[in-house]
Image (cartoon, rainbow, N blue to C red):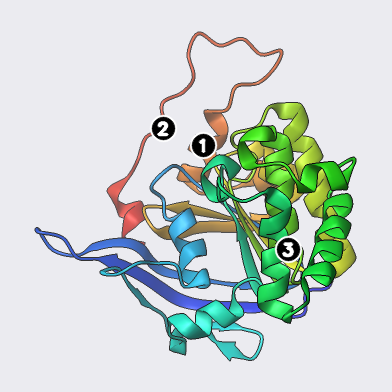
Amino acid sequence: MSTALLLSVRNLRVTYPGDEGDLVAVRNVSFELGRERLGIVGESGSGKSTTGRAIMGLVAAPGRVEADEMRLGGTDLSSLDESGFRRLRGKRVAMILQDPKYSLDPVMSVGQQIAETHRCHFRSTANAARAAALEMLAAVHIRDPERVYALYPHQVSGGMGQRVMIAMMLIAGPDLLIADEPTSALDVTVQHQVLAIMDDLVRSRGMGLILISHNLHLVSSFCDRVLVMYAGRVVETCAAGELAKATHPYTRGLLASLPELGRRRAELPQLRRDPAWAEG
């Protein structure tokens, strides 16, 4: 897959004010992304999702986003206001969230929601938007798109809802897709189906992908590179296929905590944390 530079992030910092001083949720995160699949892993609270939301311009006030550089292609993200991000979202960068039950509008059919995205970005007619939505539903391997188009979110399964979300996020043809735990609410079989659909679409469209996950096995098998985050920092970066050979104690601890089929242990090792990891 091409590694032509798509996204550049240098010293990203996200801060929330608190009664006892500022809480730094993301501290000095730097990475580059080509048209490839990048995994970001770590425990809950490590700053994975906040990093993705900062790139999308979705960190709500009073949160503050600062960076020496945050650039998508020729666009300086750090200089955009909300209206600038609104023009960017969907068309240039899109984000799939964890659970479609909470991301889809419950009073609109799923087809209408996909079509609305198309109309918003392309000023298309209702008929053209509907045709594009049906085509996108077929692209995410949904049988009988006409029937599913008319369904409401509560009428679709978790796996189908996530496919609808993928269709909605990709219908405007973004350069970058950020997937935040897109399979966490799905069973293992459906997880692999959804990931295979995302992989096929990302490869065929020449997109960049950031997959945010706590599942090290999934990331190591699906992505090209991996960033490991702890307490808002990137503590290690490696090729996904080399994740098992990672050297940082935190990454080694995460790997050691994974259960293994065929290997019985009285208890899983406890992850020991060093305060120095958060300081660099």
Q: Is residue 91 visible?
A: no
Q: Which mark is residue 254?
A: 1
Identify the mark nearer the N-term, 3 or 1: 3
Q: Which residue is mark 2?
A: 271
Q: Quadrant of residue 15?
A: bottom left
Identify the mark nearer the N-term, 2 or 1: 1
Task: Between residue 95 and residue 51, name the one nearer to us.
Answer: 95
Q: Residue most toward the left?
A: 19
Circles 2 and 1, Cβ within 8 Å, touching? The answer is yes
Mark 2 residue crowding within 10 angstroms, few (<14) / some (14–19) / many (20+)? some
| Residue visible at 48% across and 55% down in the picture | 49
Specify whether 72 is left or right of 148.
left
The correct choice, above or below, for 100 with respect to 34 in the image is above
Residue type, mark 2 in image: Leu
Specify whether 55 is left or right of 25.
right
Residue type, mark 1 in image: Leu
Secondary structure state at the residue bearing disc 2: loop
**How far separated are the C-alphas under marks 2 and 3?**
46 Å
| Residue visible at 89% across and 40% down in the picture | 143
Q: Position of residue 200 (x, y in %)?
A: 87, 54
